[in-house]
């Protein structure tokens, strides 16, 4: 009896066989902008979608298609379409379905760029936006029941890793006739499957964990063929296409997705426990900690708790400026999901587009630090953070003595 391959096997093999040529074992990078047809009828059939094939690079590309097929397999979706960036995936999806007079319900803790769509760009075209307190499921259900075209969720959130019950919210959204869209970037298809929990569409900033090496930008959305075709049509006309070179790098990175995520999650838990013991830390946010709000929901809907965590440091930016430069095995950068561990304050990473007042309203103090845990040895990452805190302690003691 045949057995469905597990995620690690799918990440290596799925989506590639159809585009391999000349007995190659790796997907080729096809950079051709156009595709030649001697048969005029065949050319036309491909152009109108009657037959499979490619006609122009802004629309489709074989290398890009292999990437899309791999992601849709991991997410258990019928179809997928890709984009030049993660924000392109988000914005194109929203603009595909929203028109003036529509209403969208979401949460306050979404990624800063997404939040800007909700607070600045969508209202400009006459879309009503209702943002609810993240984790307050009753409040979200009340807003959804008032009517909306889309219920948009991000779980875990960036950067506070708050959790929303996808299955519960999907039921509320569908009862109101809404499309339920979930940003699954932080969880990855290794740890969470929103479509199986009732979501209609799941999207990723492929730049992050899917690629995993901080060398390629991309985004992708998965779901039913009917919905994805509508998003694809918007994207092919508006032009935010994924570059084939980026698609190749993302494909290559995805082969080790499961291995990376498992190691990263192991280290994230160890770092979270270390942070809980530090006097300089006010709060630690990691869904794998039993102290985390909605830990029970995370345990129910996630297969693992992921590589992302954050913590609030006493002393605000003064302490941040001492702690982060002291780290040896960390990039201080505005990225996440890479093989290297990356630290960064939310004010210059996830929510740099927001004002201090806006960040405060979202519960993001200047001393909030986001950690994207890499694949380094757990013991080294823990020791590195310990020595950085020791330097923070010494610095503060010196200050007091002066």
Image (spheres, rainbow, N blue to C red):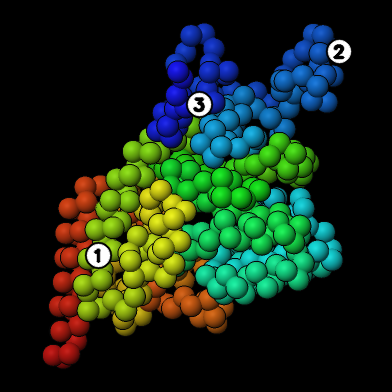
> How far apart in space, not on screen, are marks 1 and 3 (Cα)?
36 Å
Seen at 18% across and 53% down, the residue is: 380
Residue topped by disc 2? 41
Quadrant of the snapshot with the C terminus: bottom left
Seen at 54% across and 33% down, the residue is: 73
The residue lying furthest to the front in this view is 1
Nearest to the observer: residue 305 or residue 233: 305
Nearest to the observer: residue 25 or residue 70: 70
The percent position of residue 372, horizontal first and vertical second, equals 37, 56
- Residue 205 shown left or right of residue 54 in the figure: left
Is residue 350 positioned above or below 66 on the image? Answer: below
> How far apart in space, not on screen, are marks 2 and 1 (Cα)?
64 Å
Which secondary structure lies at badge 3?
A: loop
- Residue 53 shown left or right of residue 86 in the figure: right
First-in-chain label (1 vs 3): 3
Residue topped by disc 1? 273
Rate crowding at label 2 as few (under 14), some (14 to 19) or many (20 or more) other CA atoms within 10 Å: few
Q: How many marks are shown on the rendered structure?
A: 3
Q: Quadrant of residue 105?
A: bottom right
Residue 323 visible at all:
yes
The percent position of residue 41, horizontal first and vertical second, equals 86, 13
Which secondary structure lies at badge 2?
A: helix
Rate crowding at label 1 as few (under 14), some (14 to 19) or many (20 or more) other CA atoms within 10 Å: some
Contact (Cβ within 8 Å) of mark 1 with mark 3: no
First-in-chain label (3 vs 2): 3
Residue topped by disc 3? 14
Contact (Cβ within 8 Å) of mark 3 with mark 2: no
Residue 157 visible at all:
no
Rate crowding at label 3 as few (under 14), some (14 to 19) or many (20 or more) other CA atoms within 10 Å: many
Q: Quadrant of residue 121?
A: bottom right
Is residue 112 positioned above or below 372 on the image? Answer: below
The percent position of residue 106, horizontal first and vertical second, equals 64, 66
């Amino acid at each position: 009896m045949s057995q469905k391959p597990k995620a690690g096997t799918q990440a290596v093999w799925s989506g590639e066989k159809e585009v391999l040529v000349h007995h190659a074992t790796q997907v080729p990078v096809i950079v051709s902008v156009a595709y030649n047809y001697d048969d005029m009828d065949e050319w036309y059939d491909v152009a109108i979608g009657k037959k499979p094939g490619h006609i122009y690079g802004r629309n489709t590309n074989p290398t890009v298609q292999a990437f899309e097929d791999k992601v849709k397999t991991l997410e258990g979706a019928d179809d997928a379409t890709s984009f030049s960036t993660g924000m392109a995936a988000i914005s194109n999806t929203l603009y595909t379905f929203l028109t003036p007079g529509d209403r969208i319900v979401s949460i306050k803790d979404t990624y800063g760029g997404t939040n800007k769509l909700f607070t600045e760009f969508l209202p400009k075209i006459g879309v009503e936006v209702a943002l609810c307190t993240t984790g307050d499921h009753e409040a979200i259900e009340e807003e959804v029941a008032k009517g909306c075209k889309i219920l948009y969720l991000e779980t875990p959130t960036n950067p506070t890793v708050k959790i929303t019950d996808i299955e519960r919210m999907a039921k509320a959204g569908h009862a109101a006739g809404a499309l339920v869209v979930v940003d699954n970037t932080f969880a990855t298809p290794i740890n969470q499957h929103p479509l199986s929990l009732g979501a209609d569409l799941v999207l990723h900033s492929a730049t992050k964990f899917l690629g995993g090496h901080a060398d390629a930008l991309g985004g992708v959305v998965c779901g039913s063929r009917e919905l994805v075709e509508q998003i694809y049509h918007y994207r092919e006309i508006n032009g935010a296409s994924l570059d084939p070179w980026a698609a190749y790098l993302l494909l290559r990175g995805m082969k080790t997705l499961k291995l990376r995520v498992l190691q990263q999650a192991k280290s994230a838990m160890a770092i979270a426990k270390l942070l809980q013991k530090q006097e300089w830390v006010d709060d630690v946010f990691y869904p794998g900690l039993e102290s985390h709000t909605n830990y029970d929901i995370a345990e129910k809907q996630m297969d693992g708790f992921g590589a992302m965590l954050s913590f609030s440091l006493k002393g605000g930016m003064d302490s941040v400026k001492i702690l982060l430069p002291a780290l040896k095995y960390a990039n201080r950068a505005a990225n996440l999901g890479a093989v290297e561990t990356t630290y960064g304050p939310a004010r210059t990473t996830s929510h740099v587009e927001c004002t201090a007042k806006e960040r405060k309203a979202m519960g993001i103090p200047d001393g909030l630090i986001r950690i994207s845990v890499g694949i380094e040895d757990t013991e080294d990452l823990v020791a590195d953070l310990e020595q950085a805190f020791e330097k923070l302690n010494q610095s503060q003691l010196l200050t007091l003595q002066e």
